Image: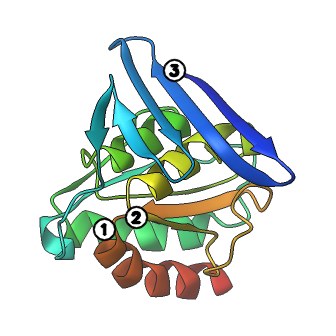
Amino acid sequence: FAIAVALQKDGTTNFGIILDVARKDCFYALKEKGAFLNNEPISVSSTSDTKDSLIATGFPYYDYEREAAYFEVFKYFMHNTRGLRRMGAAAIDLAYVAAGRFDLFYEYSLNPWDVAAGAFIVQEAGGKVSDFKGGDNYLYGQEIIAGNPALFDASLPLIRKAFRK
């Protein structure tokens, strides 16, 4: 679990903070100032090949209409990456992407409070964030993909295609 807070003004996020309570790690970012972990600068990973990547996801609950698409993507990553991980909190998954611990995160059936701080921290750490269509409705659209630029660009078409069905 985590404590996650994002501060917005006029629809623009200016600050995000995630406290990983169990590990006593504090991830945060300030608009145009970068991202930090325990006061040290962080950045997304430089992994460029999917086969060398570590992917994070969550298991959606209460929304099973898209489970076939979810498992199609999950199966692809299971066979073509170094592994998949589930931390249990989207905020932690996103913080780990920002710190380069994970290369990519995707999940659906999420709420704004699950992703607002983490998505901002990923962006300030040099990563990319979108909904499954490649748009910017990841806060209210209940779906998100976030990662380093290379793996984000390589993975978005797969996710877009699977969830279009």
Q: Quadrant of residue 78?
A: bottom left
The chosen color scheme is rainbow
Q: Which mark is residue 138?
A: none
Residue 37 x %, y %: 33, 30
Q: Which mark is residue 74?
A: 2
Q: Quadrant of the C terminus?
A: bottom right
Tag nearer the camera, 2 or 3:
3
* Depth check, front residue: 102 or 55: 102
Q: Which mark is residue 77?
A: 1
* Depth check, front residue: 72 or 19: 19
Residue at point 60%, 80% (across, down): 134
- C-alpha distance separating marks 3 and 1: 24 Å
Q: Amino acid at mark 1?
A: Phe
Tally of numbered tags: 3
* Residue 26 visible to the viewer: yes
Residue at point 62%, 78% (across, down): 163
Residue at point 46%, 45% (across, down): 94
**Mark 2 touches mark 1? (CB < 8 Å):** yes
Q: Which residue is mark 3?
A: 1
- Label 3 Cα neighbours within 10 Å, binned few <14 / some 14-19 / many ≥20: few
Query: Of label 2 and label 3, which has the lower sequence position?
Result: 3
* Depth check, front residue: 134 or 71: 134
- C-alpha distance separating marks 2 and 3: 23 Å
- Label 2 Cα neighbours within 10 Å, binned few <14 / some 14-19 / many ≥20: some
Q: Which residue, as the protein is rendered here, is positioned at the far front?
A: 33
Task: Say which element carries label 1.
Answer: helix
